[in-house]
Image: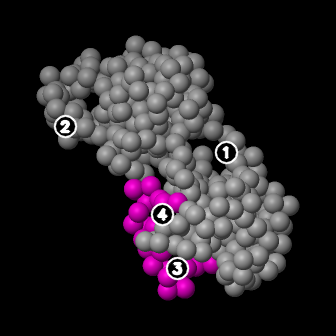
Amino acid sequence: MMPETAPYVWQETIWESLVKALRKHGLPHALLLDGERNIGKTDFTRALAKLILCRSPADSFPCGACQSCSMIDAGTHPDRLEIASGGNHVSIKVDDIRLLSSFSQRSSHSGAARIAIIPEAHLMNISASNALLKTLEEPQDQVFIILTSSEPGRLSATVRSRVQRIKMRLPTFEEIKGFVPSQLEKGSTSEFLRLSKGKPFVDDSQLSDFGTSHYQNFQECVLETLLGKKTSVELQKHAVKLTPHLAVDEFFLIAAEILKSLFIESKNSVEKSYFSSGQIVSKEEILNIYFEENSDFKKRQFSKSLAGFIASVESTQKNMKSNSNPNPQLLLDSLIWRWQRLGSFFVRENSS
């Protein structure tokens, strides 16, 4: 975890833009940083809050030595509030937002700004969301409210309409290399990137040797189901060892890799990417069938079906992030059933 002083390298462009706005006294009173989980959004908000409150900023960064910076480091700054939210998906309740409202109404201790941070703001319940809306509708001078969210679609439309939304991107391969956890040094960086989906700050428990084996077993079973060697029941047994969200994400990556490899890459030259780590056990077996058969018609037919499956996975990912409270396990089971049907088509076409 970085000190609350500077942004990560993949956040520098957004940082520079907000610093310019701050210098011109044009920083919006409410911001929403929208991006995937585990890419450093909350760290960014903390660094920004420290800069806003710093008494002697230098070169667009907080000094780290003034009284304000020292109080932030100690967690005692009276003009900075961070709502505890939700790493474990515990909802943000109305009392939390009432505390924020009271904080925004009182006078600044330092005579300057006040900063409130709400990580994973989509975890607000309805009452909390309504309470925040009232605060956003009546902004106080020199009060900045910064929300982060990995699922902004779950925020109410009225809250989204009253904040300036900023998209936070995933880091590139080069940018993330310095953040590979020490417990995975024995593995490759590309394998870490595959398991973490390109996110540098995933939960360590998800990337343990035990967790890695679950991923690999699931990947292998997905491909063997496509080849007709495993059934949907067997695939479900492996899927339950991952969360539905992780299993659906992995489905997307595997299907997208196969489609890309069929029509973009050659059999002996797999383009290096975040997720091309060679850990998908039987992908080459699938590709070999098509390249050796060299049937453009079969490739077109299969790719059309595969693209349809990928569209279903994308729709499932959106549904899982919606505020309609779908059943993630039922959505995953539906994808597993569709994948087995795709496998039946694949086997039938290649046995004719």
* Badge 2 or badge 3: first in the primary sequence: 3
Residue 291 percent coordinates (x, y)? 16, 27
- Is residue 287 inside the magenta stretch? no
Identify the mark nearer the N-term, 3 or 4. 3
Q: Residues within 10 Å of mark 2 (few under 14, many from 20)?
A: some
Closer to the eye: label 1 or 4:
1
> How many numbered marks are there?
4
Residue under the image location 81 percent in, 57 percent down:
93
Q: Quadrant of residue 266?
A: top left
Q: Secondary structure at mark 1?
A: loop
The kind of secondary structure the magenta stretch mainly shows is: helix
Q: Dividing the image into 4 quarters, which one contains the C terminus?
A: top left
- Residue 167 is labelled as 4
Identified by mark 4, the residue type is Lys
Label 1 near label 3: C-beta < 8 Å? no
Q: How much space separates mark 4 and mark 2, taking CA atoms?
A: 31 Å
Q: Is residue 141 left or right of residue 32?
A: right
In the rendered view, does 61 fall on the left or right side of 177? right
Which label number is shown at residue 265?
A: 2
| Image spot of residue 344 (x, y percent) | 39, 23
Residue 134 % position (x, y): 78, 76
Asked if one can make out residue 172 in the rendered structure from this viewpoint, the answer is yes
The amino acid pointed to by label 2 is Glu
Q: CA distance from mark 1 to mark 4?
A: 20 Å
Q: Position of residue 263 (x, y in %)?
A: 21, 39
User: Vertically, is 123 above or below 256?
Assistant: below
Magenta range is: 5-29
> Element under label 3?
helix
Disc 4 is placed on an element classified as: strand
Give the label on residue 87, or none.
Answer: 1
Residue 320 is tagged as: none
